[in-house]
Image (cartoon, helix red, strand yellow):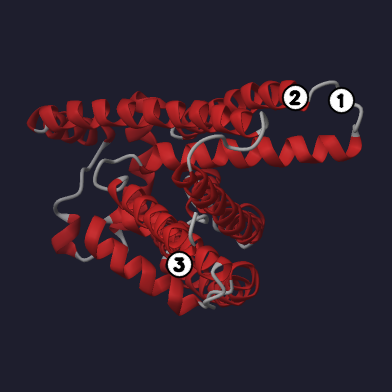
């Protein structure tokens, strides 16, 4: 194979990989892609860790297959457990109005009369309002339920595919034509970029969640402020913490709204804490994520802005992963 033909094959693999990643967004396959990358990364990392400590394992392929089943089961269990936790925290749909009414009553003193006039006055009033809204939008609710089940199904399929790819990777080098080999290299770089960005962002999310948990569950109650749904807010903070910048805005907004329902003083305290925590997270983002993929905060923000404009919220989620992959490929080519 000549150098020119090899270069054309490599360029073709770049175009095909980029096209596949972009097409995944309008086809709503991003959840399956992320789930597959998570399964592939975890299985490979755990298998390598076991191989170093248990070098006499009979078959690495068998270990990978076993780990794949365990990882897929655990990830699926975490999804179910997360839904069950939120439902238990909200005390179920029937008790939800009773949990929300104290928040509305407390917020009534903080809001202008023009807004207070439209608020429900009792739990029964809130139930009637919710029932009326549900009847008016029953078709949309049914579609949302079907869409949620479809997303969960795609996530499960993505987990299984990720496990199968990890198992195929252990069976030896890729066999096939030069384009297949080049595409395998692109997939390997994508997996490494995903590992770098997610593990780095996971560290930031864990630190952010730890400080938020101390603030919501310890400091605020000691100060006499008991925020509603505090434990749920901690869980939400960790989950959305994997989204750079945007996740921070989501969790901060929810915490401030929850604090405002208690009192204006609690909201001011929460806002000051979150501003300080945001400054710390900005420093951590520059040190951990930026150091991992050698990207500055403004680069990630620009990537999220462009993909959000093109693909909506899915683009915001995909931007850090896609940008990390792009930088990985540029480094491999020696361009940066």
Viewer-side residue, 269 vs 212 = 212
- x and y percent of residue 195 in the render? 60, 52
Q: Is residue 91 visible?
A: no
Residue labelled with disc 1: 57
Query: Could you tell me how far apart the alpha carbons at marks 1 and 2 are, in whole angstroms?
Result: 8 Å
**Other-residue count near label 3 (Cα within 10 Å), few / some / many at <14 / 14–19 / ≥20:** some
Q: Is residue 148 above or below residue 23?
A: above
* Image position of 22 (left or right of 171): left
Which mark is first along the chain, 2 or 3? 2
Viewer-side residue, 194 vs 251 = 194
Q: Is residue 280 visible?
A: yes
- x and y percent of residue 108 in the render? 28, 56
* Image position of 164 (left or right of 136): right
Which residue is outermost to the left?
136
**Other-residue count near label 2 (Cα within 10 Å), few / some / many at <14 / 14–19 / ≥20:** some
Q: Which mark is residue 63?
A: 2
Judge depth for marks 1 and 3 and give the one in front.
1
The quadrant the C terminus occupies is: bottom right
Which mark is first along the chain, 3 or 1? 1
């Amino acid at each position: 194979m000549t150098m020119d033909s090899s270069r054309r094959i490599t360029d073709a693999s770049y175009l095909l990989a980029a096209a596949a990643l972009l097409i995944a967004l309008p086809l709503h396959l991003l959840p399956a892609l992320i789930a597959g990358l998570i399964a592939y990364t975890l299985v490979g990392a755990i298998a390598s860790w076991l191989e170093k400590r248990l070098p006499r394992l009979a078959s690495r392929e068998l270990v990978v297959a076993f780990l794949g089943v365990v990882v897929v089961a655990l990830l699926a269990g975490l999804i179910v457990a997360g839904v069950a936790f939120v439902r238990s925290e909200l005390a179920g749909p029937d008790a939800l109005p009773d949990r929300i009414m104290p928040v509305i009553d407390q917020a009534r003193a903080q809001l202008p009369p023009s807004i207070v006039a439209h608020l429900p006055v009792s739990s029964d009033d809130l139930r009637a309002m919710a029932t009326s809204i549900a009847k008016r939008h029953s078709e949309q609710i049914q579609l949302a339920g079907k869409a949620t089940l479809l997303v969960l199904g795609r996530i499960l399929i993505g987990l299984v595919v990720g496990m199968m790819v990890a198992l195929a990777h252990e069976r030896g080098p890729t066999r096939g034509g030069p384009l297949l080999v080049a595409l395998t290299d692109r997939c390997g770089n994508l997996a490494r970029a995903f590992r770098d960005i997610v593990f780095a962002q996971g560290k930031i999310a864990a630190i952010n969640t730890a400080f938020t948990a101390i603030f919501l569950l310890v400091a605020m109650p000691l100060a006499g402020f008991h925020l509603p749904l505090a434990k749920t807010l901690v869980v939400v903070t960790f989950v959305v913490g994997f989204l750079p910048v945007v996740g921070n805005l989501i969790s901060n907004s929810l915490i401030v709204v929850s604090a405002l329902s208690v009192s204006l003083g609690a909201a001011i305290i929460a806002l000051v804490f979150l501003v300080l925590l945001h400054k710390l997270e900005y420093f951590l983002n520059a040190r951990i994520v930026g150091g991992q993929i050698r990207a500055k905060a403004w680069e990630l923000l620009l990537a999220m802005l462009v993909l959000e404009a093109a693909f909506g919220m899915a683009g915001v989620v995909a931007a850090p992963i896609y940008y990390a992959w792009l930088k990985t490929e540029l480094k491999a080519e020696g361009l940066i």
